[in-house]
Amino acid sequence: MSFRRARIAALILLAASCRRAYDDRPVASLSGSAATEARFDAIRARWIDGTPAVRAAMRIELNALVIELNKSGDGLEPLARAYLALSFLYAGVPAAAEATSRPLIDGPPGVANDLGTLVKGASARRLGRPHEAIELLRPLVGKLIDPFARPLLYEEITESFLDEGRWDDAIVYAEGWLRSASGAEKKVTRVAVARVLGRIPEAFALKVLEANVSAPPEAKKSPELIVILSARVDEGSAAAAIAALDAGVTDGAVASAEAGPAPVAATTTLVPLSPVRFDPRTIAVLVPSSTPGFSTGASAIVRAAAAVATPALSVAFHGDAGVDAPGTNVLGHRLAVLDTGGTATGLAKALDAAEREGAGVVIGGVTEAEADALAALAQSRRIAAVLLRSPRVPPPLAPGERQVWIALARTAADEQKATLAAATGDVAIVDPWPELGQDTPSSDPLRARCDAQPKLAGAAAFPIAAWRAKKITAVVVLGDARCARRVADELIASTPPYRPTLVVAPAALEIAHVVLPLSRTVIGVGLLPAGDTAPAALRTLWLDQGAPVGLLGALGHDATALAAAALPGDLVGTTETSALQKARAMTVTRLLAAKAELWTSSAASATGNGSIPLSLHARTVSSNTALTPSWLSP
């Protein structure tokens, strides 16, 4: 063989040995014709300089170009198709955009593939599939995607998190959106981010601003984002600050916004806006319905509260409560549902609104922080309150002062202690969903949080491999039922099969009613998990909501039952100060002595210290079985 032939053979062998799968190598979009290349360059220039309306109008031209390039097999066809798919998106036809992008998703990596994935993700969101959109769009963030497409990517992923009610994630990507802009783009980007974050509930914006005050320097939000969140809370002052940002005055103009609202001390007495009144028909429910991890629980509380007086309570919604409940009942009570955002500031604002609504009794304190704040504020304002959780530090009482609140549940520490005590053998722990400002995960490789995310696509979110290696026999979930189900699903999907016992806290007791190939130890509360002896009202609530009654639903029932017992109907409404104070004092007396049939406790009323202890008990559910009350059978 000649040297030349040997060289050619070696090159062929080298090419064969180095060849990778088509899907693994980026492919540039190149035309085989200089004229076609020049034609597309002219289209690209108009596209980049064009507005969304201009890009939408280009779809007829782009469609003709794609057909032509496809017939000739030109290498620019994928990129032209990507522009066509985006054009359909800008025209408001996401189904057509998604269909057009499909060949790009199946094609090789590269610019056209990235743009096709962007279109598919954006289309999924606009067609009501935000979770799918997040999975598609998140890997694109940080890639060298075309600059014109970057704002669309950030807008769509931010909107997707908003669609799912994941406000904290939306804020993270909105801040990335702001950072991605430069030069003349900054002004347009600020306006777009402010528009999109207008969907953030006011109470949650307050929560972020409040947390930012005490955050370490490296964790503080950018001044631009702080100004935009301030706009959500106070449009008048924030508008001027945004104008200052656009003018380039960034040092002093945003100082007040960056400082955020002053934290509300738990013992501070805030004077609500007038007129304050007393309405013996009104029970206010203060819940963090806009806070990630609590919106479902808030809805459960309100539904259970509304079901206390059959057939239903009249419900007045305010702010961003976002929960449903039915209409009027013969007793004439009503619920005023107010969003707290999970902060002391938000809770104080919600209590202000509750007093303007005339609330005779206030229900709240879902989180420990809210329980602490509500106990202190209710005490200082002398308004009767039922706390869904015991405060960690009860407010001090002056000599001769009477406590005005009662508490239904133990502290989170008590519930966690009872849950851990039920676990035997080698134990791993999954901590609850973090509240804002609690973003530091544990350094323990066997410990995880409810918000755990996989490090690689297709990998497990929870450290199942580490649990298996350490021969963990019990996984203790201290979060809610949604968290417990996430953990259970990953354990069930593990290969080879790995089946430790799942030990769940009271907040996740509903999982006892689900058939799973895992044994479970459930910390029940009072009558829950519900069985054959459940009272008629509990059965009705389960059947009406189409799901088992959980801890928060039971607490909502019990709190409203006690509140209604404290408001028997012989009091009259008033706005006159002395009459209002007298009516509130009488309501407090009745609340402290109120008795009701409770679902969470064997007690019927508060003890001397104002608490109604939960009746906790462990319940074992074998694998491939579930607790199914006989009354569910048709």
Image (cartoon, grey):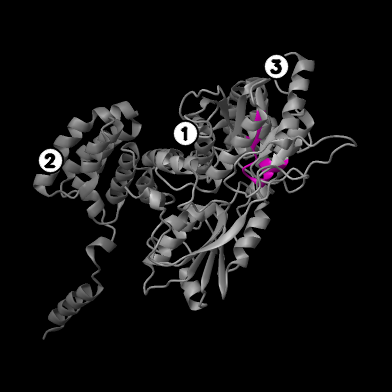
Q: Which kind of residue does numbered mark 1 sit on?
A: Glu
Please determine whether, in this image, residue 62 is positioned above or below residue 408: above
Screen quadrant of the N terminus: bottom left
Q: Which kind of residue does numbered mark 3 sit on?
A: Ser
Q: Earlier in the sequence, mark 1 or mark 2?
A: 2
**Is residue 474 one of those drawn in magenta?**
no
Q: Residue at x 68, y 20 (%)?
A: 571
Question: Gap in Å between the C-alphas at discs 2 and 3?
Answer: 68 Å
Q: Is residue 423 left or right of residue 520?
A: right
- Outermost residue toward the front? 533
Q: Tell me, yes or no, if residue 456 can be seen here.
A: no
Disc 1: which residue: 185
User: For mark 1, does the 10 Å Cα neighbourhood hold few (<14), some (14 to 19), or many (20 or more) residues?
Assistant: few
Q: Quadrant of residue 505?
A: bottom right
**Is residue 367 one of those drawn in magenta?**
yes
Disc 3: which residue: 274
Query: Between tags 2 and 3, which lies in front?
Result: 3
Q: Residue at x 73, y 33 (%)?
A: 378
Q: Which kind of residue does numbered mark 2 sit on?
A: Ile
Q: Which residues are magenta?
A: 361-372
Question: Gap in Å between the C-alphas at discs 1 and 3?
Answer: 44 Å
Question: Gap in Å between the C-alphas at discs 1 and 2?
Answer: 34 Å
Residues at circles 1 and 2 in contact by the CB criterion of under 8 Å = no
Q: Is residue 131 left or right of residue 363?
A: left
Camera-nearest residue between 199 and 153: 199
Q: Residue at x 57, y 46 (%)?
A: 599
Disc 2: which residue: 67
User: For mark 2, does the 10 Å Cα neighbourhood hold few (<14), some (14 to 19), or many (20 or more) residues?
Assistant: some
